[in-house]
């Protein structure tokens, strides 16, 4: 069976975990959390990178940092993972879903302004498949209406928009290190704090609402409960595993890009024959090959293709059921404007096997089966 995902292992994970075992220091914010944070801060050019237990938790921290309250509105695409919305609903927000662009599957930046009301507090762009949203347009709208921009860059680690790393462009950026993502530690994430005034409060929120970080830096002589918060820091064991992956981030990235390019090159003919649609990468974006997807003509065709690939020992999967048509989505949000693309495009999208160190002969087999299905 050619699996849809095989999480990366790069070689140093065991050695680093062994070091944690020997150090006898397992709780958060030890040596490897520090190494991972400093690595991200210098690589991604952000003010502060805080490791979290997941991207979901980085998003929840963002909602607290943005002071989201009962009745506030938050704008995001309906074509995303539940956590993008849940984090804000937990603080009492109403979710305002905006349609996506059919070419990138990202929020349509030209529809955001019309969805803004006096209650709007934040925009949450999701960089689908590690391909950037139109951040210049989004930041401009945010500035005009004084809104927070929280990037859901769960899939966008190492991707760039106009030379800047995704996650470092908005006020806050959220990464995922779940095993289905490019760089992983099983379950994990990070919050990028891109503006100095938010750093101290972010540390407090992450440490159960206490000023423990300040205490350890010697800035206060005891630590106490000072704000809202929860336990958002991962153990050193996870951080050690993650640091091994971050150290080899460029190697992983290049390897995934090679696989992605091979898929694209070999499938261009099927696109030319108008059998399938391939992903679109805007000129100003350098992507991280998080995902290789194609679009079928219809839901029915996609179902037949999944079954055909499965019968040929190839695992392929579809992606999000749009949030606005889910039970919770109906309760906690509404779709602003017309759903011209979200539902239609989501029904056609199919993700092919894609992971670090994937055998090129396996990619060849997937390509061969696609030709067999379509021609
Ligand atoms: C994976 C993902 C998340 C959640 O990440 P976790 O680390 O599993 O919490 C959130 N948003 C998007 C777009 C994702 O792809």
Image: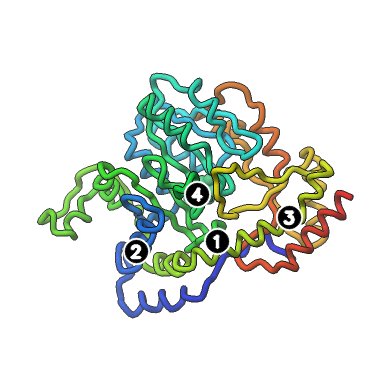
Q: Distance between the Cα atoms at labels 4 and 3?
A: 22 Å
Question: Which image quadrant: the N terminus?
Answer: bottom right
Q: Earlier in the sequence, mark 2 or mark 3?
A: 2
Q: Distance between the Cα atoms at labels 4 and 1?
A: 12 Å
Q: Nearer the viewer, residue 196 or 331?
A: 196
Residue beneath disc 3:
265
Residues at badges 1 and 2 in contact (C-beta under 8 Å)? no
Q: Earlier in the sequence, mark 4 or mark 1?
A: 4
Residues at badges 1 and 3 in contact (C-beta under 8 Å)? no
Residue 288 visible in the shown view: yes
Is residue 138 toward the left or the right of residue 277 in the image?
Answer: left
Q: Earlier in the sequence, mark 1 or mark 2?
A: 2
Residue 328 visible in the shown view: no
Tell me residue 144's x, y (percent).
38, 25
Instruction: Find numbered disc 3 in the image and state the secondary structure of the residue it sits on.
Output: helix
Q: Earlier in the sequence, mark 4 or mark 2?
A: 2
Residue beneath disc 2:
33
User: Which residue is situated farthest in the right direction here?
Assistant: 375
Q: Can you tell which of label 2 and label 3 is closer to the viewer? A: 3
Tell me residue 36's x, y (percent).
37, 63
Residue beneath disc 1:
253
Q: Residues within 10 Å of mark 2 (few under 14, many from 20)?
A: many
Q: Can you tell which of label 1 and label 3 is closer to the viewer? A: 3
Q: Can you tell which of label 1 and label 2 is closer to the viewer? A: 1
Tell me residue 238's x, y (percent).
42, 65
Eyeballing the image, is 208 above or below 89? below
Q: Nearer the viewer, residue 349 or 111?
A: 111
Tell me residue 137's x, y (percent).
48, 31
Residue beneath disc 4:
160
């Amino acid at each position: 069976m050619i699996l849809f995902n095989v999480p990366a292992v790069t070689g140093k994970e065991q050695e680093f975990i062994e070091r944690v075992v020997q150090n006898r220091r397992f709780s958060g914010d030890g040596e490897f959390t520090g190494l991972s944070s400093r690595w991200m801060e210098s690589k991604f050019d952000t003010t502060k990178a805080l490791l979290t237990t997941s991207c979901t938790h980085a998003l929840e921290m963002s909602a607290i940092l943005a002071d989201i309250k009962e009745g506030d509105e938050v704008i995001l695409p309906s074509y995303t993972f539940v956590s993008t919305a849940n984090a804000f609903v937990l603080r009492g927000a109403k979710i305002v879903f905006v349609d996506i662009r059919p070419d990138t599957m990202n929020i349509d930046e030209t529809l955001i302004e019309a969805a803004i009301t006096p209650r709007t507090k934040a925009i949450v762009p999701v960089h689908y498949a590690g391909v950037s949203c139109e951040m210049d347009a989004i930041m401009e709208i945010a500035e005009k209406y004084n809104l927070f921009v929280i990037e859901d860059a769960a899939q966008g680690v190492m991707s760039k928009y106009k030379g800047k790393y995704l996650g470092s462009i908005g006020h806050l950026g959220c990464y995922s290190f779940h095993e289905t993502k490019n760089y992983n530690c099983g379950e994990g994430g990070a919050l990028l704090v891109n503006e100095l005034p938010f750093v101290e409060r972010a540390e407090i929120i992450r440490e159960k609402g206490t000023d423990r970080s300040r205490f350890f830096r010697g800035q206060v002589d005891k630590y106490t409960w000072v704000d809202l918060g929860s336990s958002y820091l991962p153990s050193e064991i996870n951080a050690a595993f993650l640091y091994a992956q971050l150290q080899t981030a460029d190697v992983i990235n290049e390897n995934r890009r090679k696989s992605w390019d091979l898929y694209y090159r070999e499938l261009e003919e099927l696109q030319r024959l108008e059998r399938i649609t391939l992903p679109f990468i805007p000129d100003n974006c350098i992507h991280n090959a998080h995902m290789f997807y194609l679009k079928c003509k219809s839901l029915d065709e996609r179902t037949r293709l999944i079954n055909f690939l499965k019968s040929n020992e190839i695992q392929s999967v579809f992606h999000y059921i749009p949030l606005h048509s889910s039970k919770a989505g109906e309760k906690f949000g509404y779709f602003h404007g017309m759903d011209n693309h979200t539902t239609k495009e989501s029904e056609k999208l199919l993700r092919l096997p894609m992971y670090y160190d994937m055998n090129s002969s396996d990619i060849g087999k997937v390509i061969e089966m696609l030709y067999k299905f379509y021609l």
